[in-house]
């Protein structure tokens, strides 16, 4: 490692940053498991972690934005690992198969998905961040937060004060029983009507905003009052049949939305680019120089080529950092060949290739040995994890949406069609893919943040490795603690943890209550998403208990009032939006963190008693 590289490493990947990041990773990962199970959704934690990293590092006298970026990367890395597990594994308990899964197998699922996601992002970084026009809205927002935030005492007080308020509220409700869980309830047959006394639920509605929540409520009214109340009153079906139709339709809409993401945000852009390349190729064949055309980088260079593509760029845009011949500094110290498509950094070594190959080999062995898959299934999981992780990166880059559980379902259905595996193993398949895809979307967004503010991609990826591997352990520990504290009956339906996505996976494994309603939902969800309508939100509204939708809508209404007050008082919009996001993020984190602490305390009390 040369001196310049050593100085850069010290400036970005610091001991203080790693320590703060690891502590934050434990907290964020644990709260993410709780949030995903409780809400049936998982908001991106990036803004929260960016502000937290800035506040804590500045308190220690560290002012480097790149150091803060890597610190927040470590903090947030475990969040999507937690989401991948929470969106799939609880389906095992929902089906009553708890005795057939161990914590070691859950850890193996998380580890395999994490390693595969890390490898894929290392290989596609350059192509999907540097050489593409993908916006990665979450990563861009994080960069803007780091660049523009004045995260000093005021912002820190807002963040941690809101966390303390939500945590105290959760204690009064869940521990002391002073605050009821539901208020304004009404006895409507087949419908759980009321408002949830949950700051976390209100903050989710506030953060998501008006249009999406409006469609969420459309789905809630359609499912609860249209199908259940209206359909049963009209004599079209009985209450049990109506509830089966609602759950099947909601699941179909959510899955169709995932297919819509694949179609509109991945397939169609690729088709358009392929046509553009063919057009450029035809121009080139007619005698014109296409060196500067889109996707063409035909520079040639010499130098040893590593398995990751250490040589000249073969697919970058003209003038991209991956193209040969564009280097300004040609001194011996900096004369290493540049990277081509993919790659963790612009400089490669055999160690890079060996490390990534080791990750793949370990993931494959985990699938074969720890999860008891045969060679065919293990190879299929490894290969399809790369395909779906690329799809996830494309989706997050264009829309900021990562339908990780949908990608897991796609691979699950493929494996189920061509192999003989148990129901529990199908959940393992979905879990590995969901973790890989969730992590891929998060890592690629972080790479985009790093590109904007100038963070070294190698250091950033190493931060992801630290946080993701720590997150695998924490996520599994929290799941085990929640099961020990509340039992497997607490998951699914109207229970303590709605686990909507896991319920979808469980239904696909065990059987769909109403196949016609599910098919209608899939088709409608695909078409609606392609038409620009948030079908995922519509499906959540149809599927989730009505009180959850109503409470979330109340949070969105608070956002509308907040925005109007800001406009009426002439408050600067950007500062007001930052304040709202900080407070809402703190509320979201505070309640979920206390929920996890309560679960661990319950387990400890049970062991002690």
Image: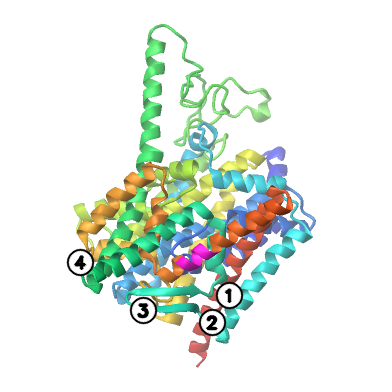
- Residue 371 seen in the current view: no
Can you give x and y, in whole percent of width and height, for residue 83 in the image? 46, 60
Q: Are marks 4 and 3 in contact (CB under 8 Å)?
A: no
Quadrant of res 510: bottom left
Q: Tell which of 15 and 564 is nearer to you.
A: 564
Label 4 to label 3: alpha-carbon separation: 31 Å
> Are there few (<14), some (14-19), or many (20+) residues within 10 Å of tag 1?
many
- Pointer 4 or 2: first along the chain: 2
Tell me the crowding category of disc 2: few under 14, some 14 to 19, or many 20 or more residues within 10 angstroms, Cα based.
Answer: some
User: Which residue bears the numbered disc 4?
Assistant: 236
346 with respect to 159 (left or right): left
Instruction: Find residue 218 and report its horizontal and vertical position in percent.
Output: 40, 58
Q: Which mark is residue 489?
A: 3
Which secondary structure lies at badge 2? Answer: helix
- Residue 551 part of the magenta segment: yes
Name the residue beneath numbered marker 2.
174
Position in image of residue 342 (x %, y %): 48, 36
What is the magenta range? 550-554
Q: In the structure shown, which secondary structural element does the residue marked by tag 4 occupy?
A: loop
Residue closest to the far front: 234
Seen at 30% across and 49% down, the residue is: 524
CA separation, marks 3 and 2?
18 Å
Q: Which residue is mark 1?
A: 594
In magenta stretch: residue 409: no
* Mark 4 surroundings within 10 Å by alpha-carbon count, few (fewer than 14), some (14 through 19), many (20 or more): few
Query: Which comes before the other along the chain, label 2 or label 1?
Result: 2
**Front residue of this view, candidates 316 and 174:** 174
> Which residue is drawn at the image coordinates 35% and 72% (left, top)?
493
Q: Circles 4 and 1: CB distance less than 8 Å?
A: no
């Amino acid at each position: 490692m040369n001196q310049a590289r050593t100085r850069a490493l010290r400036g970005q990947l610091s001991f203080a940053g790693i320590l703060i990041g690891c502590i934050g990773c434990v907290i964020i990962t644990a709260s993410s498991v709780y949030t995903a199970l409780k809400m049936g959704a998982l908001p991106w934690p990036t803004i929260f972690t960016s502000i937290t990293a800035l506040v804590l590092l500045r308190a220690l006298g560290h002012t480097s934005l790149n150091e803060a970026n890597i610190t927040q990367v470590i903090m947030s890395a475990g969040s999507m690992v937690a989401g991948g597990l929470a969106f799939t594994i609880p389906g095992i308990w929902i089906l009553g198969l708890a005795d057939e899964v161990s914590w070691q197998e859950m850890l193996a699922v998380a580890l395999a998905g994490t390693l595969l996601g890390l490898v894929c992002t290392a290989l596609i970084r350059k192509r999907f961040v540097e050489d593409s026009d993908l916006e990665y809205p979450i990563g861009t927002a994080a960069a803007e937060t780091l660049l523009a935030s004045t995260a000093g005492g005021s912002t820190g007080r807002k963040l941690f004060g809101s966390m303390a308020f939500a945590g105290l509220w959760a204690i009064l409700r869940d521990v002391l029983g002073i605050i009821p869980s539901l208020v304004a309830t009404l006895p409507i047959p087949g419908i759980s009507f009321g408002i949830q006394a949950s700051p976390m639920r209100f903050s989710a509605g506030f953060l998501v905003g008006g249009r999406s929540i409006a469609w969420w409520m459309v789905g809630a009214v359609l499912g609860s009052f249209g199908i259940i109340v209206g359909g049963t009153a009209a004599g079209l079906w009985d209450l049990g049949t109506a509830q089966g139709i609602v759950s099947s339709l909601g699941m179909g809409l959510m899955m169709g939305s995932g297919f819509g993401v694949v179609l509109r945000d991945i397939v169609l852009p690729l088709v358009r680019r392929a046509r553009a390349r063919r057009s450029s190729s035809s121009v080139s064949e007619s005698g014109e120089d296409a060196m500067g055309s889109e996707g063409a980088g035909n520079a040639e260079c010499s130098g040893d080529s590593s398995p990751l593509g250490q040589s000249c760029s073969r697919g970058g845009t003209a003038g991209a950092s991956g193209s040969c011949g564009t280097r300004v500094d040609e001194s011996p110290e900096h004369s290493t060949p540049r990277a081509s498509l993919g790659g963790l950094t612009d400089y490669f070594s055999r160690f890079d290739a060996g490390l990534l190959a080791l990750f793949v080999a370990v993931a494959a062995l985990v699938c074969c040995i720890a999860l008891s898959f045969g060679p065919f299934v293990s190879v299929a999981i490894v290969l399809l994890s790369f395909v779906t992780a690329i799809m996830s990166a494309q989706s997050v880059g264009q829309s900021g949406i990562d339908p990780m559980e949908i990608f897991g379902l796609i691979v699950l259905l493929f494996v189920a069609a061509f192999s003989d595996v148990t129901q529990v193993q199908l959940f393992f398949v979905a879990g590995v893919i969901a973790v890989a895809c969730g992590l891929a979307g998060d890592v690629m967004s972080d790479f985009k943040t790093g590109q904007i503010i100038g963070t070294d991609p190698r250091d950033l990826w190493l931060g992801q490795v630290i946080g993701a591997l720590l997150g695998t352990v924490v996520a599994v520990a929290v799941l085990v603690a929640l099961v020990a504290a509340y039992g497997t009956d607490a998951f699914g339906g109207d229970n303590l943890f709605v686990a909507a996505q896991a319920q979808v996976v469980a239904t696909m494994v065990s059987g769909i209550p109403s196949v016609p309603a599910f098919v209608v939902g899939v088709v409608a969800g695909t078409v609606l998403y392609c038409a620009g309508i948030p079908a995922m939100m519509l499906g959540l509204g149809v599927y989730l208990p009505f009180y959850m939708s109503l409470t979330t809508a109340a949070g969105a209404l608070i956002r509308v009032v907040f925005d109007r007050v800001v406009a009426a008082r002439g408050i600067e919009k950007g500062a007001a939006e930052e304040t709202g996001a900080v407070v809402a993020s703190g509320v979201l984190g505070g309640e979920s963190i206390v929920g996890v602490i309560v679960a661990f305390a319950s387990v400890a009390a049970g062991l002690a008693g």
